[in-house]
Image (cartoon, rainbow, N blue to C red):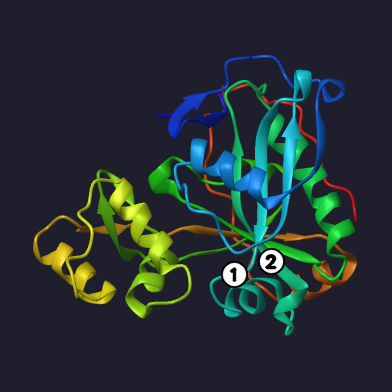
């Protein structure tokens, strides 16, 4: 489906921006928030309710200081995510935008306003970070339109992969690896799956064996997931210099030509 409205989320349901006007910058503020606040917001609203290994969380506040959006900058699953898409040999010079969510109360072009300002706070909090990688999941209706609007480099389309789903929800690979390997936090990961309707492990049943049983019993189902779009935001001159040697693909098609063009809030060098 194609639409002129921006997709939003509220209580883990996909919605559309209610306000067809554009955002009034004077009506919103952006600031760093604590991880507890960000975690609760993500758990309540995001279609991926788990909280990543966060470095910095930034919030968008609307009228009456209500929290209407969150951006979470996090540690990537592997260092290769940073070195491959940013060109920096030192993975600490990059991070991932692991969660970005605005509620349907935010007007149409709120994403570009919010993300551009969130990057400024990221740089103030972590000045060593010069590039940000983010992925868009077309299976969830995301092709990275806001990333294109902010001139992010479209680096790649990842290979399709097999994912596990329950109750129509995809379980993140990090959640599954915590359980399989018995890592710190695996008990909380098990709780997440139980909250989706899966039975708890039986007495003396190890976490990895529990997952295998759920697959055999077809409580956890395998699905082929389309490739993700990988983008890179180059926040400094050095990051742009490094990016010259890396791929820069054409942006995916977003909207028909007849759709109106909304004003956007571009990034500045920070």
Contact between marks 1 and 2 (CB within 8 A): the answer is: yes
**Residue sitting farthest toward the front:** 203
- Compared to residue 249, the image places residue 150 above or below, namely above
Q: For residue 134, which quarter of the picture?
A: bottom right
Q: Is residue 170 left or right of residue 37?
A: left
**Label disc, if present, on residue 107 of the rendered structure:** none
Q: Is residue 67 left or right of residue 78?
A: right
Q: Can the viewer see residue 55 in this picture?
A: yes
- Compared to residue 77, the image places residue 9 above or below, namely above
Of 250 and 53, nearer the camera is: 53
**Residue sitting farthest toward the bottom:** 89
- Compared to residue 104, the image places residue 168 above or below, namely below
What element does badge 2 sit on? strand
Disc 1 designates what residue?
Answer: 76
Q: Position of residue 48 (x, y in %)?
A: 46, 48
- Residue under the image location 23 percent in, 68 percent down: 211
- Residue under the image location 41 percent in, 68 percent down: 186
Disc 2 designates what residue?
Answer: 95
Q: Is residue 23 left or right of residue 172?
A: right
Q: Position of residue 247 (x, y in %)?
A: 63, 69
For the N terminus, the image quarter is top left
């Amino acid at each position: 489906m194609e639409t002129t409205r921006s997709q939003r989320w509220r209580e883990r349901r996909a919605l559309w921006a209610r306000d067809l006007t554009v955002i009034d910058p004077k009506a919103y503020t952006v600031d760093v928030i604590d991880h507890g606040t960000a975690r609760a917001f993500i758990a309540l609203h995001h279609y991926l309710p788990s909280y990543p290994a966060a470095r910095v969380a930034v919030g968008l506040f609307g009228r009456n200081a209500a929290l209407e959006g969150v951006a979470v900058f996090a540690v990537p699953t592997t260092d290769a995510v940073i070195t491959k898409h940013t060109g920096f040999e030192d993975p600490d010079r990059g991070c991932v935008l692991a969660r970005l969510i605005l509620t349907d109360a935010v007007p149409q072009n709120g994403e570009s306003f919010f993300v551009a300002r969130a990057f400024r706070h990221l740089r103030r909090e972590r000045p060593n970070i010069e590039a940000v990688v983010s992925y868009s999941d077309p299976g969830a209706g995301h092709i990275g339109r806001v990333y294109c609007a902010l001139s992010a480099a479209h680096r790649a389309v990842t290979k399709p992969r097999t994912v596990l789903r329950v109750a129509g929800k995809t379980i993140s690979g990090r959640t599954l690896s915590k359980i399989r390997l018995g890592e710190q936090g695996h008990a909380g990961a098990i709780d997440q799956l139980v909250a989706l309707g899966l039975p708890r492990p039986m007495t003396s049943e190890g976490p990895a064996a529990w997952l295998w049983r759920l697959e055999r019993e077809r409580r956890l189902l395998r699905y082929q997931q389309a490739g993700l779009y990988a983008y890179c935001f180059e926040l400094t001159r050095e990051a742009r210099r490094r990016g010259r040697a890396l791929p820069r693909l054409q942006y995916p098609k977003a909207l028909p030509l007849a759709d109106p063009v909304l004003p956007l809030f571009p990034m500045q060098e920070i």
